[in-house]
Amino acid sequence: MATKEELDAAVARVNALPSAPGTSDMLALYALYKQASVGDATGSRPGMFDVKGRAKWDAWNEKKGTSREAAADQYVALARRLGA
């Protein structure tokens, strides 16, 4: 189980990558981080003209029911897979 410090270190490593991961990986990282730090998606789904916000909210909402601990573990594992 990843600790808060391990999650924070993984976030720092991802932010220091020489090039940004692809869109699907970025959405997965966002969703896992939000699930690990906040829990299930909150608020209403952004409107159709907010394409980026809607994609991020949808990715986060797909993690609904995932525990914060499991989301943190998955984030750390994805960061390692991306070379961070």
Image (cartoon, rainbow, N blue to C red):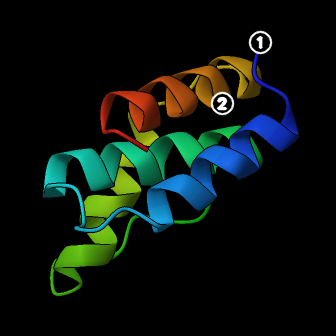
The single residue placed furthest to the right in the displayed view is 4
Q: Which mark is residue 82?
A: none
Residue 23, percent across and down?
A: 16, 57
Residue 23 vs residue 34, the one in the foreground: 23
In the rendered view, would you say 22 is above or below 69?
A: below
Does the rendering let one see residue 39? no
Residue 12 or residue 69, whichever sits in front:
12
Residue 16: x and y in percent read 46, 67
Q: How many C-alpha atoms fall within 10 Å of the one at disc 2: few (<14), some, or many (≥20)?
A: many
Residue 76 vs residue 72: left or right?
left
Q: Quadrant of the N terminus?
A: top right
Q: Amino acid at mark 1?
A: Met
Residue beneath disc 2: 72
Q: CA distance from mark 2 to mark 1?
A: 8 Å
Q: Name the spot of residue 24 as percent of width and height, x first.
A: 17, 47
Compared to residue 9, the image places residue 18 above or below, namely below
* The C terminus sits in image quarter: top left
Q: Residue at x 24, y 76 (%)?
A: 52
Residue at image position (30%, 52%) is: 27
Asked whether the viewer can see residue 21, the reply is yes
Residue 64 appears left or right of 54: right
SS assignment at label 1 = loop
> Which one is in front, 54 or 83?
83
Q: Is residue 7 above or below residue 21?
A: above
Location of residue 46 in the rendering, given as x and y in whole percent from the top left corner: 35, 74
Observer-nearest residue: 33 or 5?
5
Q: Determine contact: label 2, label 1, CB under 8 Å.
A: yes
Task: Give the residue drawn at x 47%, y 30%.
Answer: 63
Q: Helix, strand, or loop for circle 2?
A: helix
Label of residue 1 in the image: 1
